[in-house]
Image (tube, rainbow, N blue to C red):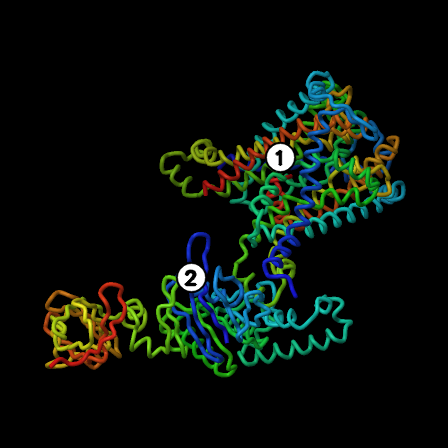
Amino acid sequence: MIELRNVRRRFGRADVLHGISLTIAEGSFTSLLGPSGCGKSTTLRIMAGLDRPSAGQVLMGGRDVSELTPAERNVAMVFQSYALYPHLTVRQNIALPLAMRHMTRLERLPLLSGLMPSARRKRADIARRVEDVARMLGITDLLERKPGQLSGGQQQRAAVGRALVRDPALFLLDEPLSNLDAALRVQMREELTALHRRTGRSFVYVTHDQAEAMSMSDRVVVMMGGRIVQQGAPRTLYDEPASIEVARFIGSHRINLIEVRIENGRLVGPFAHLGVSGSGLPARAVLGLRPEHLRPARGGPVAARLEKAEYLGAETLLHLRLPDGARLRAVAPGSYVPPPEGDGVELEVAPGQAHLFESEGGQRLRVALQRAA
Amino acid sequence: MRVQPVVTLLLVLGAAIVLLPFFWMISVSLKPADEIFTPHVDLLPSRLEWSNYARAFTEVPLARFLLNGVIVCAGILVLQILFTVPCAFALAQRRFPGRTLVFGMVLAGLLVPFHVTAIPIFLALARLKLLNGYAALILPFAASVFGMFLFRQFFARLPADLIDAARVDGLSWTAIVWRIAFPLALPAATAFAIFSITAHWNDLFWPLIATSDPAIATPPRGILYFRDQEAGDDVGPLMAAAVVVTAPLVIGFLLAQGAFVRSIATGGLRA
Amino acid sequence: MRPGRRIREALTDLWLVGPGVAAMLALIFVPVALVAVLSFTDYQFGARSFRWVGLENYHRLFTDPIGRKAVTNTLLYVAIVIPFSMTLALLVALGLHRLAQTMPRLSGILQAAYFLPVAATLVAMAIAWQMLLHPSIGPVNAVLKQLGLPAPDWLSDRGLVLYTLAAIGIWQSVGYNMVLFLAGLAAIPRHLYEAAAVDGATRGWERFWTVTWPMLGPTTLFVAVITATNAFRVFETVATLTRGGPAFASDTLVYALYREGFVYFKAGYASAITMVFFVVMMVLTLAQFALIERRVHYR
């Protein structure tokens, strides 16, 4: 659908994008995920045609579109601030892109258009499509209001309506939910995925919220420092993070990262039950363990001391300390009754759920972990 | 708080002095001639002589003066907006080579009062045979650097997303300027319009130079014709004409006091 | 084949900026340059040729009694208007600012009254002043006569006329300066007065000297410069009431510019007057810019 080939962007002396290559499949829901300043918004703006790459190519449907304006690319965009035109009603806001697209300069003149049959016909057509979109988004009774009279969620819907109305080939969404409160955000997530399913168009969704990216998209592109560090299905990112940075960014609980030594194909220290196989093993590495994969189990191979237990209802967050002084977090089910603080806890961890990264550079080590003999 | 009543009294007294010319103008405009020319001066007319107003409109083409004022002010305002708004928008929202230079021109232009340019502009209009016409009264004011400055400051605060949204929605840059940016700049436009209309409705300097035909005289120029042609026996109608000429802006001011004060105060940059 | 995006962008910029820049060049910058050039010539409107005369026009303006009169009159006019207009405006603003707390409606009405001359058509108001000050039918002299005081000829007495014009100038500018002072007063944080009260400055005068006056400092300077800028271009009242007379007793720079240039058609000499006026205005406007800049930085 849209493809970036080695796209670079400099602002003055600062390189914002260092060669982004990316293909968005037809009909996919792709998230660009990363911390602020990682270049994800610039990437989106380059796709939209609002910004131009300093080098590299942008292709849509196999055709180079770098000479095309945003409108000519037939993309629609939803902005973080919604960017509704404050002086126009919701109806006029939604109708504007259609009028710009389908009516000639002459037909748009307010006085003349009443006299021209073609203009009248087109106006009626536009009005019908605006009604359709409004009905679909449930904002029919808001059509005569100005954006200033709408709540955040209503403005969001109006902005989506304006994007939707001209049936674009590609939807670009730039942090569209980040100005909403938590409850509304969850609801709008569902509405946006439903919209994606119904339209069947490609969506590119920029966010810094990994939960949004994971829950909505079929493909997540993680960006950091102007580079793509990993892309794949949400499950792949979670199961096989390509680097410490990705592992840290993905997942609702922050991953435990522990410096370990490797001797004779096994880890030294509290995780000695984990064996490593593979060629060219380094002597030192970083072990990544997600808190939700560390389960308290009597007789489990990892011994730690409980410092604090946070009961959260559905689960209990355990703050632990290993014998060598390293901190560790684990998540137990809400039904778990923790021992008094200061007592020992034994933990179980499945080898398939542990990750090893290079201690220099943080890249994932392509090695297999298994239970040591 | 004993001083408060004294202060209030002084303030009221001061305001009365300030309003005295207005009061006298209206009073004389309603006085019969024999009450004007008496050694005994009365503040108020004994009866209201409305015929002074009728005579003001018949002895000189006062209606024509007013119409000229409207045509000139409207012409100037429309031209100024056509010339300044796109330029101000580009200065605020686009990056182009020479942008700093153009903005420098705007700031430098603020240093130049209109009087300074009068002689060459007069020469040029004379050569183009445009003197003594509406063009001579309107064209010299087409470029308002003050307007450019005011609109640029306003446009610089427009959210970038709004303009990006308009680009995605298929608006040309011209359409963005006139359909999005300008309607949103309505507060700035109002302030500028009040400033421009006040300045040009009241201006005498340029109409005195550029026109000698009473048929296109603006109100201040016209009222001078009136005063100079009457030999001193038509004071009532003259004052009536003065009232009529002053009334539009004064009424406008009283209706929209806040906007007026703000506009004229920002105009302090270039009054 | 359409032009490339770069060219289209450049054309857009040209389309947006071009007319404005062309107008600025044609109506401001080229004329300024021409005036500067003309000021060194003896050019007359309608003449076929001209001669370079160097600084003669400037020399004449400052040595010729009539030229000098225009300069000194203007300076005297400005020197009278600035202190009186500002002092009155400050007093009115202080009074109205306080009155606004107890009687906001009356304060608003008085504010409008003081501001009215700013919006009114000055030419028409000048004629109203002419009637007020009329030697035989004006109420001012009628009152003076009744009180047994001398009734001077305000607008045709050589020694008095400039002061009369200055008084009208003050009348016209007080409201404008009052608005600027009111804005300055509104910007003074209330807690400063509370702090001053704690320190023992409770009476009106003490409050004024410890808080109001120092805090109004930048505003005052700004108002002074604006008043000067406006006073220097005095023209309407002169043209309406005296035409610089009697015997050039009320001649001013802008009126001399008008008379020499457009009544006597001496474009060269008028250009020199223009340049002198321009330099003064430029200095004042630059001072204004600097003060605005500083006020912005204070905040």
Marks 1 and 2, how far apart at CA: 59 Å
Picture residue at 73% right of the left edge, 33% below the top: C236
Q: Which mark is residue C174?
A: 1
Q: Identify the residue under disc 2.
A: A17
Which corner quadrant of the image does residue A232 belong to?
Answer: bottom left
Q: Does residue A96 appear left or right of residue A202 in this picture?
A: right
Picture residue at 78% right of the left edge, 38% below the top: B124
Picture residue at 18% right of the left edge, 68% below the top: A282
Residue B260 in view of the camera: yes
Quadrant containing the N terminus of chain C is bottom right
Mark in front: 1 vs 2: 2
- The reply to whether label 1 and label 2 mark residues of one chain is no
Q: Does residue A363 appear left or right of residue C290 in this picture?
A: left
The 10 Å Cα crowd at callout 1, few under 14, some 14 to 19, many 20 or more, is: many
SS for tag 2?
strand
Classify C157 as above or below A326. above
Which corner quadrant of the image does residue C162 belong to?
Answer: top right
Residue B40 in view of the camera: no
Q: Position of residue A36 (x, y in %)?
A: 39, 62
| Parent chain of label 1 | C
Which corner quadrant of the image does residue C275 belong to?
Answer: top right
- Residue type indicated by callout 2: Leu
Q: Does residue A139 appear left or right of residue A4 in this picture?
A: right
Q: Position of residue A212 (x, y in %)?
A: 39, 73
Q: Position of residue A200 (x, y in %)?
A: 50, 82
Q: Which mark is residue A360?
A: none
- Residue type indicated by callout 1: Val
| Parent chain of label 2 | A
